Amino acid sequence: MRLHTTSTRYLKVLSAAATRFDLDGLPAGDVTAEQRQQALQALRERFQKQAERLRAEQASRDKQADRVREEQAAREKQAKLNMLVEKFNSR
């Protein structure tokens, strides 16, 4: 039951619903303003955590991409230096 009542889908419906329904689909009472607010707060917290996690993942990917670019630039620089060394050593 907890799995169902903490799902994003359930909380979205609860935050907009006026009537609560039981598992058989029959009306089971009204949704109070407090329950609606709790559902909205839970959704806000859930979406905020998700956004923070996505930002952290993007920052990690950006950092990895920067490392790869720096390594590539270092390899290219080393290759150019090696070409210069060969050019001047062959004289």
Image (cartoon, helix red, strand yellow):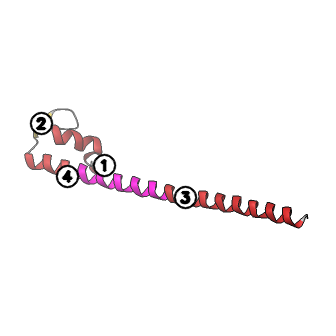
Mark 2: few/some/many CA within 10 Å (<14, 14-19, 20+): few
Q: Is 86 placed left or right of 54 in the picture? A: right
Looking at numbered disc 3 in the image, what kind of residue is underneath it?
Asp
Q: Which residue carries the number 2 mark?
A: 19
Q: Amino acid at mark 4?
A: Gln
| Residue 47 image position (x, y, % from top left) | 30, 50
Q: Which residue is mark 3?
A: 66
Density class for disc 4 (Cα within 10 Å; few <14, some 14-19, many ≥20) is: some
Tag 1: amino acid: Leu
Q: Earlier in the sequence, mark 4 or mark 1?
A: 1
Label 1 SS: helix
Answer yes or no: do the residues labelled 2 and 1 have beta carbons within 8 Å? Answer: no
In the foreground, 16 or 70: 70
Decide if residue 8 is on the left or right side of residue 15: right
Q: What amino acid type is highlighted by mark number 2?
A: Thr
Of the two numbered discs 4 and 1 in the rendering, the one whose residue sits closer to the viewer? 4
How far is the residue under mark 2 from the one under mark 1? 20 Å
Q: Which badge, 4 or 2, is on the more N-terminal residue? A: 2
Q: Dot 2 lies on which element? A: strand
Which residue is more in the foreground, 50 or 23?
A: 50
Q: Position of residue 31 (x, y in %)?
A: 11, 42
Between marks 3 and 1, how big is the CA–CA gap? 40 Å
Above or below, comparing residue 85 to residue 8 in the picture = below
